[in-house]
Image: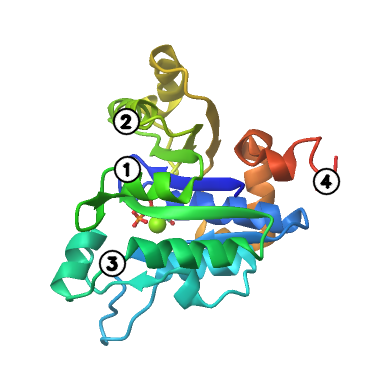
Amino acid sequence: MQGVFVTGTDTGVGKTLVAGALAAAVRRRGARVGVFKPCESGCEQPDGSMHARDAAFLQRMSGSTAPLEHICPYQLREPLAPAVAAEREHISISMEHISDVFHSLCADCDTMIAEGAGGLLVPIADGVLTLDLIRQLGLPVLVVARLSLGTINHCLLTVRQIQSAGVPLTGIVFSRTQEQTTAAEQTNPDVLQRYTDAPLLGCLPFIRPAQKKDPDGLARIAQQTLDVSRILPDIFSPASGFYKS
Ligand SMILES: Nc1ncnc2c1ncn2[C@@H]1O[C@H](COP(=O)(O)OP(=O)(O)OP(=O)(O)O)[C@@H](O)[C@H]1O
Ligand SMILES: [Mg+2]
């Protein structure tokens, strides 16, 4: 299957926003994009109801008609690593079920954008890390990182782990989670490139709340600021059937 598995250097770094923006861009190009968030934790709302916020955002941005229970087969209550949240709810996370749902989603799309929970070595089932899940799904990895102090260390740790596992790495994308410009933000990309050959594939700018609700606007921002032809070559490269100049 073509596409990317979006992981992050940490939780809360912008994986969902980047994945959603990419999905919106694929949709805008006229291709069918599948989205997948195998496990989402912290779904319990104050009134006790459940809401898988990331999966719902990915569904909205992609225009996917798949039911939310397929986009996110494991919706867990507590904001914990999926393996821990599941254990506390006495839910057994089945890698076989995740794989079956993933392949059924893939059958209806041209490319697939999956989002992990937290970072690369987050436990998602008993003895299974996100990295193991990525291997199982067979998608190349896109790393989302903050532009802030600390990101060089987090990026290098994540990239080295991916490379030593022999998993294909698409590259790194930054997400500007704050409006203010910092010295770290100005220097991070250049410094990082001195220590890794991982491709740096752009920086999603600071997105205002109203822009997060507009798939077409977000798609345009993604196409302007991210190297979409290297992230999703089957959709955006000149050789693809979907290419429009
Ligand atoms: N470029 C950006 N502009 C504005 N806000 C951003 C940007 N990137 C991330 N954020 C905000 O930061 C918060 C965390 O981002 P997001 O939910 O995408 O992170 P995540 O890595 O998917 O987190 P999780 O590990 O919980 O899945 C959200 O409120 C999101 O809207
Ligand atoms: Mg997320």
Sequence order check, earlier mark of 1 and 2 = 1
Give the alpha-carbon distance from disc 2 to disc 3, as whole Å. 24 Å
Lower sequence index among marks 4 and 1:
1
Give percent across and percent down for residue 85.
20, 67
Residue at horizontal 43%, vertical 38%?
Answer: 143
Name the residue tied to disc 4.
241
Q: Residue at x 40, y 16 (%)?
A: 191
Farthest residue toward the left?
A: 88
Q: Amino acid at mark 2?
A: Gln
Q: Is mark 4 within 8 Å of ligand 1?
A: no
User: In this picture, is 75 found above or below 12?
Assistant: below
**Mark 3 and mark 4: Cα distance apart in space:** 38 Å
Q: Earlier in the sequence, mark 3 or mark 4?
A: 3
Q: Are marks 1 and 2 in contact (CB under 8 Å)?
A: yes
Residue furthest to the right in view is: 245
Dot 2 corresponds to which residue?
Answer: 161
Instruction: Tell me which residue sits at (51%, 49%) in the image.
Output: 18
Measured in 3D between alpha carbons, the distance from the residue under mark 1 to the one under mark 3, in whole angstroms, is 18 Å
What's the residue type where badge 3 is placed?
Ile
Residue matched to label 3: 93
Crowd rating for badge 3 (residues with CA inside 10 Å; few <14, some 14–19, many 20+)? many
Q: Which residue is mark 1?
A: 120
**Separation of marks 2 and 4 at Cα, in angstroms:** 34 Å
The residue at label 2 has a CB less than 8 Å from ligand 1 = no
Helix or strand or loop: what does disc 3 sit on? loop
Q: Which mark is residue 64?
A: none
Q: Position of residue 164 (x, y in %)?
A: 34, 26
Q: Earlier in the sequence, mark 1 or mark 3?
A: 3
